Amino acid sequence: MTTQYVPNGTENRLGPPPGRHHDVVVVGARAAGAATAMLLARAGVDVLVIDRAAYGTDTLSSHALMRGGVDHLRRWGVLDRVAATTPAVDRSVFEFGGDRLVVDVGGELGDPLYAPRRTVLDPLLVDAAREAGAEVCFGTRMIDLARTSSGRVCGIDVETADGGATRIGADLVVGADGLRSAVARRVNAPVTRRGRHCLASIYGYVRDAELASDEYHFAYDDGLVGGAIPTNDEMHCVFVSMAPVTFRNRARLDVAAALERTLARVSPSIAAGARAGSIVGPLRSFPGHVGQFRTPHGDGWALVGDAGYFKDPVAGHGLSDAFRDAELLAEAVLTDDLEGYELVRDMLSTPLFDHIESFAALAWDAAGARDALLNFALAMAAESDALCEHRDTVRGAMH
């Protein structure tokens, strides 16, 4: 049965009433924006969220949740909703030129992992934000930022679904509108660090594939990556990643052939399992974009998610970091410490960013990929420990 989510009756399709003022306006109702709004609203903050898309639409995403992302959803009380429709993942399988490594990720280690489609995850977070008291308006596009005479951001001008326009006041405008953030562009948010390497990717969804429904399966071979991730509606997300120049010269004009050819090279078993099923919907591709850090705050504005910090999707850590930074930003808003938000975000992010940058250079063979993944795992564990220490510090300061 196809999973469907419908608005809970509180959606304002024509946009917010004109002339309103909110404590915080969030531009973007995806994972980072909806989570930020939920956390602020739970703390009693008056929050409005707008998004130009419709409720429940899909978006380009590497949607496999790693341990950090699952832990956030559990602490927020949202994990059960994800688990109700999404297969549980108890192990990860890694192939390196034919060699296999199997790692248990559930059971005694904690909750299983999950890979919900964004058509599932984002609406669940939106609903949780609404339940906490946030107002959410879809089909509403930010036209520009409003500013005071001194230049401070004090709201947004929006275009609503019926073609109208209005101004919404805010003490803080949060850009949660992705890598090409309009908020970041309007405030000229500086890029404080930019990577040099990235990967291009092709992915699609296969139904009834002969692939395990309880494992993440990743494969690596001489500068190529492939994998299969179980997701909603008895489907798997199958993907490949490669150097951008390889994508441009050999894959871009026929992504279906490139997906099948690359999967067959890195993992014949994934390729055979995918061929046994049927592709649902169009294949999607991403030509690659180098990672970057932007200054995530200024006079009356802040950035969260990919708008503030983007890294290559190959590590599958994007959603985990989106949730982490939503929590860090909500804490910073409540304690009036946006500078601290940037410092903690960068401290937590830099080690993994460095490892991803090295991996995306593709200067490795199958054996080197194993070492790179070990570095990923160590960096993620260190980040988790540092984040727990930060939470303890925040709780201690608040009490």
Image (cartoon, rainbow, N blue to C red):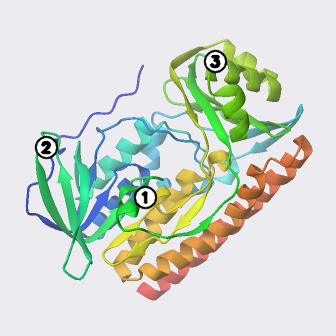
How far, Cα to Cα, is label 3 from label 2? Answer: 41 Å
Mark 1 highlights which residue?
Answer: 76
Kind of residue at disc 3: Ala
Q: Nearer the viewer, mark 1 or mark 3?
A: 3
* Residue 99 to residue 18: above or below: above
Q: Nearer the viewer, residue 221 or 395?
A: 221
| Neighbours of disc 1 within 10 Å: few (<14), some (14-19), many (20+) | some
Q: Is mark 2 on a helix, strand or loop?
A: loop
Q: Name the residue under label 3.
A: 209
Closest to the camera, between mark 3 and mark 2, is: 2
**Eyeballing the image, is 295 above or below 278?**
below
Q: Identity of the amino acid at label 2?
A: Leu
In the rendering, at what x and y percent does residue 50 appear?
A: 26, 52
Q: Which of 24 and 386 is in front in this view?
A: 24
Disc assigned to residue 399: none
**Mark 1 or mark 3: whose residue is earlier in sequence:** 1
Q: What residue did someone put label 2 on?
A: 14
**For the residue marked with disc 1, what is the amino acid?**
Trp
* Residue at position x 81%, y 21% in the image: 268
Q: Does label 3 or label 2 sit earlier along the sequence?
A: 2
Task: Say which element carries label 1.
Answer: helix
What's the distance in space between the residues labelled 2 and 1, CA to CA?
Answer: 30 Å
Query: Is 345 on the left-hand or right-hand side of 99?
Result: left
Which residue corresponds to the image point at 75% horizontal and 21% vertical from the top-left?
A: 261
